[in-house]
Amino acid sequence: MAEVARSCRKLQDAASDRVYFVSVARHGTGPEAASVDLAVTDAAGAWTTAGLTAADLKGQAPHKLSHFLAALSDLELEGLPYKTGFAERDGGLLVKVSWQISPNDPRVLVSTTLPPAPSAPPVIAAMLALLAENVAALRGVSESLLAQVKEYDKQVAQKDHLVESYVKTKEAQDRETYTKVAALLNSKKAKLRELQQQVNELQEESRRLKQGGAAAAAETEPMEEDDEEGQRPGSTAAAARTAGARHSRQQISEEYEEESDDEEEDRGRSQSPARDCD
């Protein structure tokens, strides 16, 4: 069974601004190979035709059936600014569609004449039924879009919640990291100050030791010079003279002590007979 696509649109005559309702049913998939059932009403009369093909359209233009359907229905994409016209002639209705590829090109016109319908109410009722179907389809599309919007809003809310949670977690981690880093840096600074103090103390101790060593060296230099002078040429004779003088003083002291002892012994002997006479 051939595929049928249906459309119903409200159009306006470009010359008289009169409103017409156009119903299109396309049989088949290829626009140029398809056949079209077309019905038009102005709420007072109705005009219909069945099995309309590209050969039934007047005018010379490539893909004229596609342009005709694009102007009168939603079955083809409307890629050009089309103009539609409707005119009653001898009971029939002339339907015209024109377009212009570019401003410098002439306008292209295709048309067809629809015979009057035997009765307008059935045509109008069929259009109303199609419009009702379209409304139901639009309602279904609207509900589907609304459900998609709700799902989208739900996903957006979840995303916002995830982003907010991530931001809070990241901020907490950053604060913890900053705290740890600050504590580590403070401990390192304290350690560096301690080491600097130790270095300063060692430098001060080293300075004192150097000053003390310099003073001790200055005190020992004269003694070393004396020792060195004693070892110079001629110092042996001076040392011998000094030793001889010391020896002479010692002999004189010993002789003086011997003479003192002899005098005491003599005084002791002179006093002893006197005690015997008594």
Image (cartoon, rainbow, N blue to C red):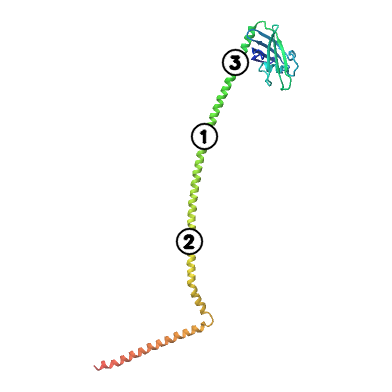
**Amino acid of disc 3:** Val
The image position of residue 2, as x and y in percent, is 70, 15
Earlier in the chain: of badge 3 and badge 2, it is 3
Asked whether 47 or 191 is in front, the reply is: 47
Q: Residues within 10 Å of mark 3 (few under 14, many from 20)?
A: few
Residue sitting at the far left? 278
CB under 8 Å between discs 3 and 2: no
Residue sitting at the far top? 118
**Amino acid of disc 2:** Glu
Camera-nearest label, 1 or 3: 3
To which quarter of the image does residue 276 belong?
bottom left
The residue carrying mark 1 is 165
The alpha-carbon separation of the residues under discs 3 and 2 comes to 100 Å
The alpha-carbon separation of the residues under discs 1 and 3 comes to 44 Å
Mark 1: secondary structure: helix
On the rendered image, what quadrant is the N terminus found in?
top right
Does residue 177 sit above or below 196 in this rendering?
A: above
The residue carrying mark 2 is 204
- Residue drawn at 49 percent across, 63 percent down: 207
Give the numbered dot on residue 135.
3
Camera-nearest label, 1 or 2: 2
The image position of residue 30, as x and y in percent, is 72, 18
The alpha-carbon separation of the residues under discs 1 and 2 comes to 58 Å
Asked whether 225 or 115 is in front, the reply is: 115
